[in-house]
Image (cartoon, rainbow, N blue to C red):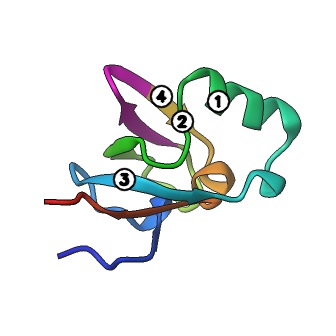
Amino acid sequence: MLSPDLHLTQLPRTCRATVASIEWDRMSPSEARRLREFGLDEGVDIEMLHRAMLAGGPLACRIGRMTVALRAHVAGAIRVAPLAG
């Protein structure tokens, strides 16, 4: 069972969750704009697909039908919660 308050960087591989909150001020305006263009916002379902072997490396997540690579500091600004149901 997932903790109710988890950073995206802590989400286990192949687990799905809902974006609970995003700390937009922890990323640059261009990073925030890119995420919004991908449809990432509170309430969206997200799945952790892959993570880099090196600590602090990028992550690959599924948002809807898209696979998106995120820098670790961006993923660290995203809090997720277990899927309802």
Give the magenta range.
59-67
Q: Is residue 72 magenta?
A: no
As helix, strand or loop, the secondary structure at mark 4 comes to: strand
Are the residues flagged by discs 4 and 2 in contact, CB closer than 8 Å? yes
> Callout 2, which amino acid?
Leu
Give me the C-alpha separation between circle 4 and circle 1.
12 Å
Name the one closer to the observer, 28 or 40. 40
Are the residues flagged by discs 2 and 1 in contact, CB closer than 8 Å? yes
Give me the C-alpha separation between circle 3 and circle 4.
16 Å
Find disc 2 in the rendering and name its residue. Answer: 40
Are the residues flagged by discs 3 and 2 in contact, CB closer than 8 Å? no
* Quarter of the N terminus within the rendering: bottom left
Nearer the N terminus, badge 4 or badge 2?
Answer: 2
Say which residue appears at 40% left-offset and 38% top-offset.
61
> Callout 4, which amino acid?
Val
Nearer the N terminus, badge 4 or badge 1?
Answer: 1
**Residue 78 location (% of width, % of height):** 57, 57
Please tell me whether residue 69 is drawn above or below residue 85 in the rendered image.
above
Nearer the N terminus, badge 3 or badge 2?
Answer: 3
Find disc 3 in the rendering and name its residue. Answer: 18
**Residue 68 location (% of width, % of height):** 47, 28
Name the one closer to the observer, 76 or 79. 79
As helix, strand or loop, the secondary structure at mark 2 comes to: loop
Give me the C-alpha separation between circle 4 and circle 2.
10 Å
Find disc 4 in the rendering and name its residue. Answer: 68
As helix, strand or loop, the secondary structure at mark 1 comes to: helix
